Amino acid sequence: MDTIYLHGVRAKTVIGWYDWERVAQQDVELDLDIGLPSNRASASDHLDDTIDYDLVVRTLRDELAQQHFQLLEALAEFIAHVLLARFGAPWTRVSVTKLGILQDVARVGVTIERGHRS
Ligand SMILES: Nc1nc2c(c(=O)[nH]1)N=C([C@H](O)[C@@H](O)CO)CN2
């Protein structure tokens, strides 16, 4: 399966288990591997035959800015659902990272895989 990757995508959302985290948006970093429904674009050289990664980033930033989550797991699930249901990806691996939220821990995050990879 051919894939698109988008690594190090910054987005803003309300995310956190604790009340103090839910008063403002935080920056999160997304690492996305997105399976493509076909490899048609390799031959056709046409954007309509693939998943537009620019549209993926704009869609996710817009959606996340309007949502709120308690856990990184739920945020990752939401993103995976958008990629599978709205963009037609057959498979995705989604990593979501909080930056500098824990003392002396640079990055903490969650990775999930959804769909089927052929
Ligand atoms: N498995 C998880 N553990 C924790 C999460 C989470 O999203 N998944 N979140 C928190 C807090 O929100 C943390 O970011 C700040 O203390 C704690 N544990």
Image (tube, rainbow, N blue to C red):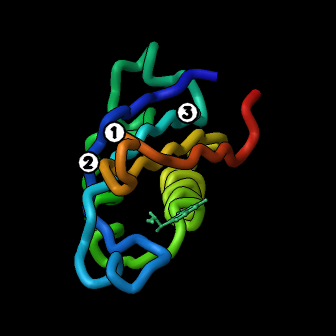
N-terminal label among 2 and 1: 2
> Which residue shows up at 40% across the image and 78% down it?
68
| Residue ID for mark 2 | 10
| Residue ID for mark 3 | 36
Please tell me whether residue 57 is drawn above or below residue 33 in the rendered image: below
Name the quadrant containing residue 111: top right
Please tell me whether residue 78 is drawn above or below residue 110 in the rendered image: below
| Residue ID for mark 1 | 53
Q: Nearer the viewer, residue 26 or 57?
A: 26
Disc number for residue 33? none
Q: Are marks 2 and 1 in contact (CB under 8 Å)?
A: no
Q: Quadrant of the C terminus?
A: top right
Name the quadrant containing residue 12: bottom left
Q: Quadrant of the N terminus?
A: top right
> Which residue shows up at 27% across the image and 65% down it?
26
> Which residue shows up at 57% across the image and 67% down it?
74
Report how far apart the C-alphas of labels 1 and 3 lie in the structure: 11 Å
> Which residue shows up at 50% across the image and 43% down it?
95
Check disc 1 and give the amino acid type.
Tyr
Q: Position of residue 66 (x, y in %)?
A: 31, 78
Check disc 2 and give the amino acid type.
Arg
N-terminal label among 1 and 3: 3
Q: Residues within 10 Å of mark 1 (few under 14, many from 20)?
A: some
Give the SS element for disc 3. Answer: loop
